[in-house]
Amino acid sequence: MIKIRALRQFSHYHAGNFDQYEVREVREEYAEALIGMDLAEEADPIQEPEPEPEPEQGQKKGAKK
């Protein structure tokens, strides 16, 4: 079993549904295939996904200037 991190949301026939940045252990052959298709990367237990920056005070997300 190899721990992988999903790079985006996707569904795999044998491994199931993945949400973006979800970390899960999957069988080695599935992990290699998903990594090869650029859907996932091997998970580093120390590394966490970077959160999206918060909008500055007084600005709404998507607001026009």
Image (cartoon, helix red, strand yellow):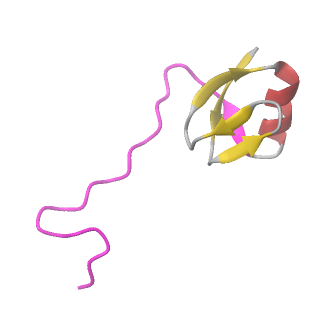
**Place of residue 25 in the rendered image (x, y in percent of width and height, measured from the top left):** 68, 20
State the residue lying farthest toward the top.
Answer: 1
Confirm whether the magenta stretch covers residue 2. Answer: no
**Place of residue 10 in the rendered image (x, y in percent of width and height, measured from the top left):** 69, 47
Picture quadrant of residue 35 = top right
Task: Name the side, left or right, on which 16 lies relative to 46.
Answer: right
**Place of residue 38 in the rendered image (x, y in percent of width and height, measured from the top left):** 75, 46
The residue shown at (26%, 78%) is 63
Confirm whether the magenta stretch covers residue 61. Answer: yes
Q: Main secondary structure of the magenta part?
A: loop
Task: Name the side, left or right, on which 38 lies relative to 36.
Answer: left
27 in relation to 57, above or below: above
Which residue range is magenta in the image?
39-65
**Place of residue 55 in the rendered image (x, y in percent of width and height, measured from the top left):** 24, 61
The residue shown at (22%, 69%) is 60
48 in relation to 20, above or below: above
Q: Residue 44 or 33: which is nearer the viewer?
A: 33
Task: Name the side, left or right, on which 37 lies relative to 60.
Answer: right
State the residue lying farthest toward the left.
Answer: 58
Instruction: Locate the C terminus and report the quarter of the image it occupies.
Output: bottom left
Count of numbered labels shown in the rendering: 0
Picture quadrant of residue 40 = top right
Instruction: Locate the N terminus and report the quarter of the image it occupies.
Output: top right
State the residue lying farthest toward the bottom.
Answer: 65
